[in-house]
Amino acid sequence: MNRRRILWLFFLVSAALLLGGCGVPREGVVDWNTAEADGWWQVVIVFPLAKSLIWLNTSLVDWDIPYSWGFAIILFTIIIKLITFPLTMIQIRSMQAQKNLQPQLQELQKKYGKNKDKMAQEQMKLYREAGVNPLSGCLPMVVQMPVLFGLYSALVALGPALTDARFFWIPDLGFPEFTRGLAWIPEKFNEGEYLLLLAYLVLPALLMISQVYMQRMTTATTPTGSEGQAGMMKQMTTIMTLMFGFFTLQVPAGLSLYWVTSNLLQLGQTYIANYLSGVNNAIPPAAPQALTAAAGAGSSDGSSSVTTAAEATEPQPKRTPQRRRNRRNRKRR
């Protein structure tokens, strides 16, 4: 992953946090029976997602399922992840294919490092020969972004509906209110409600832990061109992890529950996709130049000979002093 793609990823995550709730009031929608959508974003994305969550909650209540709102959020997140799983597979396979091409890409950088136009042409040629589309790894993310932004906006709008909705150790999925920021933390601490404060800090902690594991898992499939880019990517993911943790302290617990569930499902999807794609046993393809040279090489009597990968990687015996003397004697003859 080059620096431009890292910056684009950072920009998209920042946009999700800053603009995801755009178009809906931060205090949420109080009465969904009389609420009217304002603008195409709410009509097409936000209100359908919010009403789907309301329908799931109503169904779970009719079935006497406890903690209906919490399970409605989890169930809805699972449905979204199942729908977008094919896109996740495409993204991971594309990233693995690009990682397999890293040795050839590094050779091109050494050869054409000063000629950026020529290097770009050779890179595209290499991608075409390998049947890899460098944009296919970003396309699934772009397709999923409207859904993810819309779901975030829907959960912001559902804030009042989540008030007093318990979920196991969380007494209220609608707390803390979006408009209070971090003021609730010192308030609960000064009031001596340490257990209540701890209950609301569990989800942000789980979110940051899951983010760290996601970063470690995706490292196996993320192509890195150099140590500098790998270090920069690690810094970016650390910043995003802290950003998510900080942000979850200022939003209703129902929204934090969605993020944690989404991360855990993403971990499972990545593991399954890596297994199906054979990432652990993936062998980088041989460079086209090496294959051409091997196929065209011939022996001294004119017969062709091709060195296989196994032969190329087989360790050669050490030259002992006796072997060196025999070799010099043959040359003298």
Image: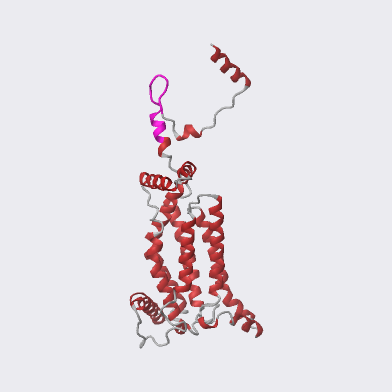
- Residue 217 seen in the figure: yes
From the viewer's perspective, is residue 313 above or below residue 195?
Answer: above
- Residue 44 is left or right of residue 103, and the answer is left
Residue 33 sits in which quadrant? bottom left
Residue 145 figure quarter: bottom left
In the image: residue 202, left or right of residue 270: right
Q: Is residue 329 magenta?
A: no
Could you tell me what secondary structure mostly forms the magenta stretch? Answer: loop
In the figure, is residue 142 to the left or right of 1? left
Residue stretch rendered in magenta on the structure: 291-305
Q: Is 89 above or below relative to 311?
A: below
- Tell me which residue sits at (51%, 77%) in the image: 253
Q: Position of residue 203 (x, y in %)?
A: 55, 72
> In the rendered picture of this protein, how many numbered marks are placed on residues?
0
Measured from the top left, where is residue 281 in percent x and y? 47, 46
Which residue shows up at 48% across the image and 51% down it? 223
Q: How is the image coloured?
A: secondary structure
Is any part of residue 278 visible from this angle? no
Residues 227 and 137: in front is 227
* Residue 70 x/y as whole percent: 47, 76
